[in-house]
Image: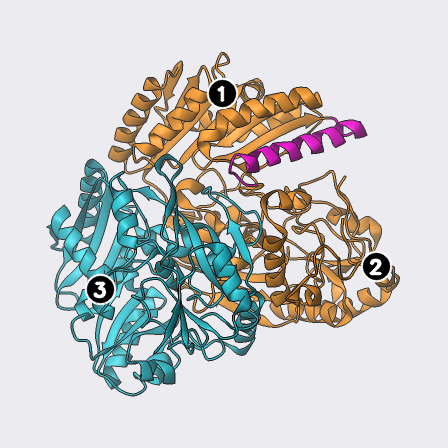
Amino acid sequence: MEAAVKPGSEAELAQLVAQAEAPFEIIGTGTKRGLGRPVQAARTLDMSAFAEIAAYEPEELILEAGAGTRLDEIEALIAARGQQLAFEPPDLSRLLGSPHSGTLGGLMACNLAGPRRIKAGAARDHVLGIRGVSGRGEVFKAGARVVKNVTGYDLPKLLTGSYGTLAALTSITVKVLPRSETEETILVEGLDDTAAVPIMSLAMQSACEVSGAAHVPGEGTFLRLEGIAASVAARRDGLAKLLARPVQILAAKASGTIWQRIRDVLVLADTPDRQVWRLSVTPSDAPALLAKLRGSLEIRYVLDWAGGLIWLDVPPTEDAAAAVIRGAMRAGHATLIRAPEGVRAAVDVFHPQAPALAALSARVKDSFDPRHLFNPGRMSRGL
Amino acid sequence: MLKMPIPDAAAIGRRAEIAAALRRIVPGEGVIEAPVEMRAYETDGLTAYRQLPLVVVLPETTDQVAQVLRYAHENAIKVVPRGAGTSLSGGALPLADGILLGMARFNRILEIDFANRCAVVQPGVTNLGITRAVEHRGFYYAPDPSSQIACSIGGNVAENSGGVHCLKYGLTANNVLGIEMVLITGEVIRLGGKHLDSEGYDLLGLMTGSEGLLGVVTEVTVRILQKPETARAVLVGFPTSEDAGQCVADIISAGIIPGGMEMMDRPAIHAAEDFVHADYPLDVEALLIVELDGPKVEVDQLIARVSDIARRNRSSTLRISESEEERLLFWAGRKAAFPAVGRISPDYLCMDGTIPRKKLPEVLRGMAELALQYDLRVANVFHAGDGNLHPLILFDANDPDQLERAENFGADILRLCVKVGGVLTGEHGVGIEKRDLMPEMFSEIDLNQQQRVKCAFDDQGLLNPGKVFPTLHRCAELGRMHVRGGRLPFADIPRF
């Protein structure tokens, strides 16, 4: 039976950590526990009490909320004021078999971003400030509550994507931005990935401000335009002309549906036994990489980020084909997203790093959490 | 005047030996030790502070940088990295007992990859040089600090530089995809690349804006963008800064993120108009330039919306640019605001706080009171969209009392920014200029955590010491788990 502790305040959390003699697994609502390597800790540190939205100031473009605040609550609140998290957080609940999309803290801990990543940046580009407790049991803050700040090291970025291995975050301030008035999607049918990636690149090189560029084998190549109606129409016409081939236009509703499908990786969600990888690559490398992988593996995949993001799945094996996949990559990184616990314990879930970088990362870990109290083993055996 | 760490006499005594060792690494003209030749490196954009370095080294290759840093590490010699030397916060101010590591020879553009919308460049390439290299295909590099003709991309990474377009297009951190860097140990590491997001910890995000304290960048991969189809600007005058501030808030609330949104106060308007004759209205308290960029139809619609919002906020004058010449004329005054202020005062200090925008009237009133108290004039230019304020404090450096008053005035302005919920620096960096104000914003615990991160990169504190942090700690001391209440362990550590 696993023990849980649930601090109700920063002071209580700090005391718990300072007096801890054994490590914790940090959780919000636990929706992303399957991401990363299995944590070697007998106790969970439940952060769900830190769930207050401390500030939402639409005209200052900021929102500050407890790390345990539900993401769907935040999205509903800001949508009511015509705003959004511009990095388009994916809801991986169907892919991961979780009941909902989780918390703000979980989202930031995993640095998840959706299709708009290519235009608006990642989660880490939208985090402005953090508060939390380090592994030394000290309450600290970094960053601030304004949208432009270079005072001190950018620890908010460092903590974003650190999978809870550096600190237990209590509060996070993010930038919120206006939602687009409308959207449309250009659909090009009949392209294989060798043809689709250059088409997406052409669109991204234009001034049409494409905010999503994805290729779903069997479904088509999708290019999204967002903004005010007149602008979307003008860019849609301009882009269609540039592509110089037959296209279909998906109006706002159909466009929204397809981008949610791409964002949430629904194409690969409903075959839970297959093992899912997420590859970040140089976009133009994608077709050759996929050709190589098809030669030795039975894969299904979706290309997002104009080819720079490959979601792919493979039939279940004990090593999730890690060596084959990473061996085929020229650059970038591959992360194992969905696999049974035993597989995630056995293979490197995150891309292995060169020795000097791995050693530096370990020193950074120690600078926050010298006793390795937080999520031990989540990112690698040492982190 | 701010104090720097007391130089290590032993290191100064070894100057000849150190120069000789550096010459073995960087042959030829790459090592400078004659004081008259080192004069060019004695200051940066914060010219009130000057210091000759111990010796200057100008490597040309990553391997040379690695050897220089390894030598410095093995011999416990301090190193100050320098790009183009345009820092406004003293980030590149040399140390009397430190090697000045100049990166100017890293001036090549290595690769332009339009298909993947990025450029790979050496850190000494200027910010504008990147745009120049890609503009024949309609591309540009988005962050545009006002020093962009001179400042280097390596310096931009070190300072996380911004510019007038960063509300819409982001700061340096949002536009850098990857770097190659050298640690003080001489180890070379690569972070990111042409792909997005880091594997493992976001050390790229940490490096950006670390002010030369964590490592030396030897290669940068940046994102390049297609230029917007068109851009137009609205020039609006307001009878009060409150009206102008409310107009900015209403534009953002209407869901509009302009390409640029700049405000000037009355003294700045007058100085700029006297200098460049941009036909600015002189009977207003605040002038707003709002630039919209994108497809023509979008720009036209948004210009109309912004104009409506401005009129509803009691604008007293409003002009819309009808040609590219007119748009550039609107900007001419703003872009010349610093030299324009330089014409009416022998010297000025350029401050750089960020505030929540709604606090602008309060901060302007507070600044006016401080101006009376210190008996000095101040002019304000303001990146209004993101709340980044640049008060320019006018003074005469030949009068030591005026310099001291100006510095104290500036410190009080930044304290005011922090008090209303803002920060000490929005884009210029802490450097030496705001170093001693860091405790206004951060607790000792906050600062110690940042310095522990520094220790993970630089265990002896050799890279750019005396910048950013008001107290130098030994890493061993920071690593201790418990400090007994109030009693300083290591009573001999430098505090300045």
In the picture of the structure, the residue carrying the numbered disc 1 is: B278
Residue where numbered disc 2 is placed:
B8
Q: Can residue B396 be seen in this view?
A: yes
Label 3, label 1: how many angstroms apart (C-alpha)? 60 Å
Task: Judge from the rendering whether residue A330 lies leftward or rightward of residue B494; answer left or right.
Answer: left
Residue at 65% over, 69% down: B66
* Residue beneath disc 3: A99
The subunit carrying tag 2 is B
Determine crowd level at label 3: few under 14, some 14-19, many 20+ residues with C-alpha closer than 10 A. Answer: few
The image's colouring method is by chain
Q: Which of B343 and A272 is in front in this view?
A: A272
Say which colour chain B has.
Answer: orange
Q: Is residue B110 visible?
A: no
Relative height, residue A54 to residue B457 (above, below): above
Please give the name of the residue rendered at 61% of the width and 72% of the height, measured from the top-left corner: B187
Amino acid beneath label 3: Pro
